[in-house]
Amino acid sequence: MSGRIERSGPRGRPAPPGRGERIADWADGRLGIHTLAKAQMRKIFPDHWSFMFGEICLYSFLILILTGTYLTLFFEPSMAEVTYDGPYVPLKGILVSRAFESTVDISTEVRGGLLIRQIHHWAAVVFVAAMLVHMMRVFFTGAFRKPREINWLFGWTLLFLGIITGLTGYSLPDDMLSGTGIRFAHGAILSIPVVGTYLAFFLFGGEFPGDDIIARLYPIHILLLPGIMLGLVVAHLILVFYHKHTQFAGPGRTKKNVVGAPFLPVYIAKAGGFFFLVFGVLAIMGAVAVINPVWVIGPYRPDHVSTGAQPDWYLGFSEGLIRVMPSWEINAWGHTLELGVFIPFMLFPLILAAIAVYPFIESWVKGDRREHHILDRPRNAPVRTGLGVAWLTVFGVLMIGGGNDLWATHFHLSINNITWFVRIGFFVLPVLAFFVTHRVCLGLQHKDRDKVLHGRESGTIKRLPHGEYVEVHEPLPQGELYRLTAHEQPRPIEIGPLVDANGVARKVPRSLRLRSRLSRAMYGPKAQVAKATPQEYLAIHRGEGDHH
């Protein structure tokens, strides 16, 4: 029996299809929408709290586009000087750029302008923060493994472009704070050997500050970078649908299925509600928390620098690199190479690039070409988790360096002591963080192994016939046992003896020797605790021994 319900017209004749149905049939015959939607709208998505960070990225990006579109209607990207004559009395009669004046006008005269502007700025801060946390979630759980390496690169590119887009947007109002940031970028560009001066003259249209930088940053900020990012977001989501979503190990979850809720109607309803929740939180932040009050900061003047000037948080580590770098320079043949600026300027992308290339390094070391759809628990990959924490430690240390003046004034510390702490901590603390994290992960693995073999502590104390007191352990449910033992434990690559049976030395490529050493470091006996086996579990529960 067909599931299609046919409408009847007069005298029992089938009623002709409605206009909407005819349009849908016309579109489906040319685009195949029905077939595509039927296959994808019932796509299953797993439910886990950590997956929401990716959604926050998407929703804050959409909010940035919506609020940014509104702001472009009133902002004028011009550095032409005008005399301010608006309603804000402290600025009356002061020479300002048209960009600064229009920003103040948005904040004081446009209906809802200040709220939209502050929502836009807060959304940018949350967008980059959510991207960083989302990528760290993907990193620590191994969600970047085949077949998702390309999606990892898309996400990394979005993070990098988000930082650059934030810098360009932060610079548009031409206030004292953003002008200081542009001066900082100008000095970094000048430090590039040979071509630095030419690049600076080209970008700024002459000597700093020039007349063109705001007008050139404007189309980059509102058109070029958002357009590239929008294309990357679409490609990222297409690949998420194509590869299916990753999930944590659990009963019934395999590499060939996904356990969760369908995209339509369950997931789309939750996503819609979450979007308005994110929008509401950002609206509250924009309404009650002032960010970048340009009317208080004042217009930019090249001969002034405000004290306590700080960029948005995601650029703090780049500023920290330059603030704590010794003022090294080389003078030769009438030219000066400013190493104190150039080295940090080059380290900034290199530190970020370390995140981008890691999936390919791990795949090469492991020699694994299989597809992975089940996520790792961070404790089960101690080396990877340690490296991630070490990278975050570098980030945190440099953030302290980027705000060394504020740390000094707020906590009554010596700025020189803070600078030396950051210089030493840049090299020492990441190594310390790696080893501590590695040991913690191994300790958690030991705990999981003990829990699988001996069960969960019940809190009940029992006295044995000979007087000893012991705590009664409860066996774990089968689902919990599976979750704690479902992870794989890769074996390190072995290159075998370097001399064959005839005493002739084997030619082993250096790359293979390097892979073997790295593999032993990442997956050797000292890098992971052997998980409990069924034989050990059965032996303990039969009373055949006590395995610790």
Image (cartoon, grey):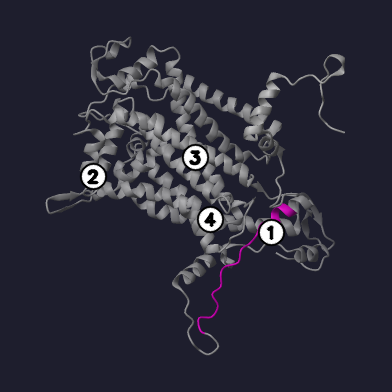
Q: Residue at x 27, y 10 (%)?
A: 85
The alpha-carbon separation of the residues under discs 3 and 1 comes to 42 Å
The kind of residue on which mark 1 rests is Arg
How packed mark 2 is, by other alpha carbons closer than 10 Å (few <14, some 14-19, many 20 or more), is some
Q: Residue at x 53, y 46 (%)?
A: 151
The alpha-carbon separation of the residues under discs 3 and 2 comes to 30 Å
Of the image marks 2 and 1, the number of the one nearer the N terminus: 2
The kind of residue on which mark 3 rests is Leu
Residue 256 screen position, x and y as percent: 70, 51
Q: Which of the two residues, 418 or 207, is positioned nearer the viewer here? A: 207
Residue bearing mark 4: 384
The alpha-carbon separation of the residues under discs 2 and 1 comes to 57 Å
Determine whether, in the image, residue 160 is placed left or right of residue 334. right
The kind of residue on which mark 2 rests is Gly
Q: Secondary structure at mark 4?
A: helix
The alpha-carbon separation of the residues under discs 1 and 4 comes to 20 Å
Of the image marks 4 and 2, the number of the one nearer the N terminus: 2
Is residue 312 visible in this depiction of the protein? no
How packed mark 1 is, by other alpha carbons closer than 10 Å (few <14, some 14-19, many 20 or more), is many
Span shown in magenta: 482-499
Residue bearing mark 2: 196
Nearer the camera: disc 4 or disc 2: 2
Determine whether, in the image, residue 201 is placed left or right of residue 292. left
Of the image marks 3 and 4, the number of the one nearer the N terminus: 3
The alpha-carbon separation of the residues under discs 4 and 2 comes to 38 Å
Q: Indicate whether residue 491 is drawn in magenta.
A: yes
